Structure formats: C-alpha cells, structure tokens
Amino acid sequence: MSRRRAALPALLLAWWMLVAAGMAAAVESDPLPVPTNGSRADAVRLYNDGVALLLARDFRQAQQKFEAALARDERLAEAHNNLAYALRMQGRHNFASSLEHYNRAIELKSDLAQAYMYRGVLFMQQGDKVRAQQDLERLRRLDARLAAELEGVVEGAVEGQGSGGVAAQYD
C-alpha cells in the first residue's frame, strides 16, 4: 500500500475530530457514510478518499478519485461538486468543466449549499457578478454561514486564499 493511500484514513479521522471540535475549515462537501455494499459503496469510498485529498490540497489526485467515483455512480451530487472544486483549484483552463460539474451537482441535489457557494466563487473568477449574486441569493435560503462567505467574495472583501479556497486561484 502506498504511503499516500495509507495516509487517507488518518486524514479523514483528523478531519472528523476537527468537525467534532467545531474547528474544521470549509470543504466543498463532507465525507459521506459508506453503504454496506454495491457500486454506490465503491463510489462513496472513492469519493471519501477524494475528500481526504482535498483536505491535503492534492487537487489532481482528488480529481482522479472523484472521476472514479462518478464512473461508478454518476448521480453522486457531492462527487460532481467536489470534482468541480478540484478542477477549479487547478486553474482557469478548467473553469468550463468545473461549471458543468457544479451545474450537474445542483441538478441532482438542488439544496447542496456548497455547490452554490463555490459556483458563485467561480462566477466571480469569470467576472460574472450577476450570476454570482444569483447564487448568493439562493445560498442565503440554504446556509447563512456559506452565504456570508460568498457575500465577502462578491463584495470584494475576501482576497487571496480564503476559507476553504473561497477566493483562491484568481490567476
């Protein structure tokens, strides 16, 4: 087993401990409980591995895990959401693909607040404040804390590396 693969369970455990203590940074979507069997279980395991890689800021490896998860269960909204985030964090050349995955995540799970949050950030990175504000309005009804973060991005109060990559990758 590779060192990276062996470190994933430890990263997830550390993340869960931070969540329990109320100190975890924002992650696109949190790890999910793993079903007992089937292709959905395989997809969720791969997804959770990808979340651990996001926490380690290994976006390319996370991308591969989320793509593998979606190959097993294309309807896993959280995987589309986190794949979009991993793509966005790798640079502007991935923005179109990132947007497609944010849109698919929202199509599959219209109350997935993180998708609105980070799609709004993507819109700002693309210079589309109108659509970012639309996502902000929807987000206000879903999650006040994330809405406040996105509002900071939309209003220009957040610069550089924000919470969980909020304003990252302005290149």
Image: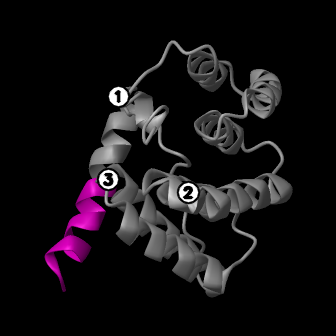
Q: In what quadrant of the picture does the N terminus appear?
A: bottom left
Distance, label 3 to label 2, CA atoms, is 12 Å
> Residue drawn 72% across and 77% down?
74
- Compare residues 107 and 123 and report the one nearer the observer: 123
Range covered by the magenta-colored residues: 1-12
Which marked residue is nearer to the observer: mark 2 or mark 1?
Answer: 2
The residue where tag 1 is placed is 21
| Predominant secondary structure, magenta span | helix
State which tag comes first along the sequence, 3 or 2: 3
The vertical placement of 170 against 137, above or below, is below
- Compare residues 136 and 74 and report the one nearer the observer: 136
State left or right for residue 52 relative to residue 67: left
Residue 27 position in % (x across, y down): 48, 43
The residue where tag 3 is placed is 57
Q: Given the image, on which type of amino acid does mark 2 rest?
A: Asn
Secondary structure state at the residue bearing disc 1: loop
- Compare residues 88 and 57 and report the one nearer the observer: 88
Residue 116 position in % (x across, y down): 71, 39
Q: Given the image, on which type of amino acid does mark 1 rest?
A: Ala
> Residue drawn 63% across and 55% down?
81
Mark 3 and mark 2 residues within 8 Å of each other at the beta carbon? no
> Residue drawn 69% across and 61% down?
101
State left or right for residue 159 relative to residue 33: left
Residue 154 position in % (x across, y down): 64, 21
State which tag comes first along the sequence, 2 or 1: 1
State left or right for residue 126 relative to residue 62: right
Counting labels gives 3
The residue where tag 2 is placed is 82
